[in-house]
Image (cartoon, rainbow, N blue to C red):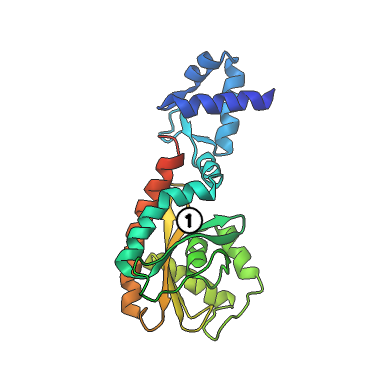
Amino acid sequence: MHLDRLITLLELIATAGRPVSVAEAQRATGLPRPTCYRLLQTLADHRLIESPNGDGRYLIGDRLIRIALLGNSDADVRQAAAPLLRKTAAALGDSVFLSRLRGGDVEIIHVETPEDPARPFFHPGLGRRPLHACSCAKVIAAFAEPEFQQQLLNDDLARFTEHTKTTPDEIRGELDAIVRRGYAECKQEIEMGVVSVAAPVRIGNVGVTFSVGAIGPVRKFSDRYCAKVGKELMELSREVSGAIQLCTLPER
């Protein structure tokens, strides 16, 4: 079957540990050379494989890695990221959380709270968050594809507080500012008195499908403190990215 041959080629390239040429793929699979070339071209057209040097030697493509990444269970991702989030929560004295893109929504999937039980803290809860208001969702939207952003701009957006941005111009300006700054803020946009900051978790070249954030009271999360937390989270995001890739992604 056509699908069987495509899968065979993907498995060959994924396990080779180096770029694979058309001739090597043809010899390994026994497929007629024209058929092998056509199937490889089909995979390349769909960005499931790629030839980074343009020399006809193929590696697994970013799109396939993204598909594999999105298929990771929350449990696997939590296990990889939890120790890193716990360390940052202890250092900041604030709750730190991990969010992921799922379909067209962003969900908080794990939270680590400060170690000191006598110290008050805010808990963000788990589950879906508004794309236009929550820092963990806004930062993913800011680095998303234009089609994803346009859908957000076209939506009828809820106003939770007087600080919630809801117009297309406001949202576009916010997304642009997030990209320039490198992290997102939610300053009383969902609940008065509550502020959160979030940074994107980039996985190689496949884009931003996760984010890490911190949440606390407005009296603590001043502009200066938000900037400090933003930098801390950007460093955390790099560590989380590495941990997630190590637990699931093949070597390239």
Give the position of the C terminus as an image quadrant.
Answer: top left
Q: Nearer the viewer, residue 182 or 22?
A: 182
In this picture, is 247 found above or below 137?
A: above
Q: Quick one: which residue is furthest to the front in this view?
A: 118
Q: Quick one: which residue is furthest to the bottom in this view?
A: 162
- Percent position (x, y) of residue 212? 43, 61
In this picture, is 186 found above or below 113?
A: below
The residue carrying mark 1 is 210
In this picture, is 44 found above or below 206?
A: above
- Identified at 41% across, 82% down, the residue is 218
Give the position of the N terminus as an image quadrant.
Answer: top right
In this picture, is 39 found above or below 239?
A: above
- Identified at 42% across, 43% down, the residue is 245
- Percent position (x, y) of residue 120? 39, 76
In this image, 43 relative to 139: left or right?
right
Q: Residues within 10 Å of mark 1 (few under 14, many from 20)?
A: many
- Percent position (x, y) of residue 42? 60, 32
**Can the viewer see residue 204?**
no
The amino acid type found where label 1 is placed reads: Phe
Q: Nearer the viewer, residue 124 or 120?
A: 120
Q: How many marks?
A: 1
Q: Secondary structure at mark 1?
A: strand
- Percent position (x, y) of residue 247? 43, 41
**Can the viewer see residue 208?**
yes
In this image, 44 relative to 229: left or right?
right
Q: Quadrant of residue 178?
A: bottom left
- Identified at 41% across, 52% down, the residue is 81
Q: Nearer the viewer, residue 96 or 250?
A: 96
